Image (cartoon, rainbow, N blue to C red):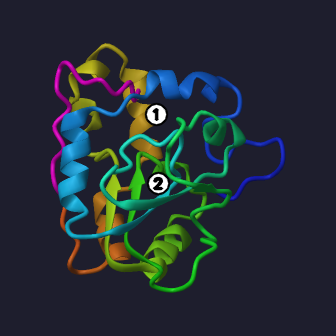
Amino acid sequence: MTQEPGKPAGDFDYDQPGLRYAAMRQADPRIAEQIRVALGEARTVLNVGAGSGNYEPADRTVVALEPSASQRAQRPAGAAPCVIGTAEALPFDDKSFDAVMASLTIHQWPDLERGIAEQKRVARRRIVILTFDPARIASFWFYGYLPPQANAERKRMPEFSRLAALLGPDTLFETVPVPLDCTDGFN
């Protein structure tokens, strides 16, 4: 998420079309619960690439990190404090948080290796990443109607084997079901 002035952080310009992002992206309570459980006993959480705050657990002390002014402006009243920054250069001391979370953001990071290394540096216990499996994107029913979008999405997402290599041998992957009545408007 290294961002030059006037340029989007990744391949989506969150400061232009992203102006309505918070209205489109509403956390689905089932997905939120799965993230909450994955965070385990973590009391302090860093939300990297936090956007408008979806999936930030209300029962923990959370600090959000977001490079986009538009996204920061869409965070609801009472949301976790939000720091301006990027995944590749986290402005926190080593082992500052029990857990680090990143929800549908890693595909926007220009330097995935550095972003993951930074998460590992500041996390005391665990890292929870919500992303899409590029190997399974084409099988998602929605993409049967839009094959070009499925191909574009598949290219954006890092392979799970790459994530496992970066995160380490204890990496665990869980399936996160996307229900038909999902309230989150991702994609």
Image x and y of residue 65, in percent: 57, 57
Say which element carries label 2: helix
Q: Which mark is residue 106?
A: 2
Q: Which residue is mark 1?
A: 152
Q: Amino acid at mark 1?
A: Ala
Instruction: Give the distance between the C-alpha atoms of the residues marked 1 and 2, in whole angstroms.
Output: 15 Å
Say whether residue 186 is magenta: yes
User: Position of 85 compared to 122: left or right?
Assistant: right
* Along the viewing direction, whichever of 112 and 95 lies nearer the viewer: 95
* Along the viewing direction, whichever of 4 and 155 lies nearer the viewer: 4
Image x and y of residue 7, in percent: 77, 43
Say whether residue 157 is magenta: no
Earlier-in-chain disc, 1 versus 2:
2
Which region is colored magenta? 174-187
Q: Nearer the viewer, mark 1 or mark 2?
A: 2
Image x and y of residue 116, in percent: 46, 70
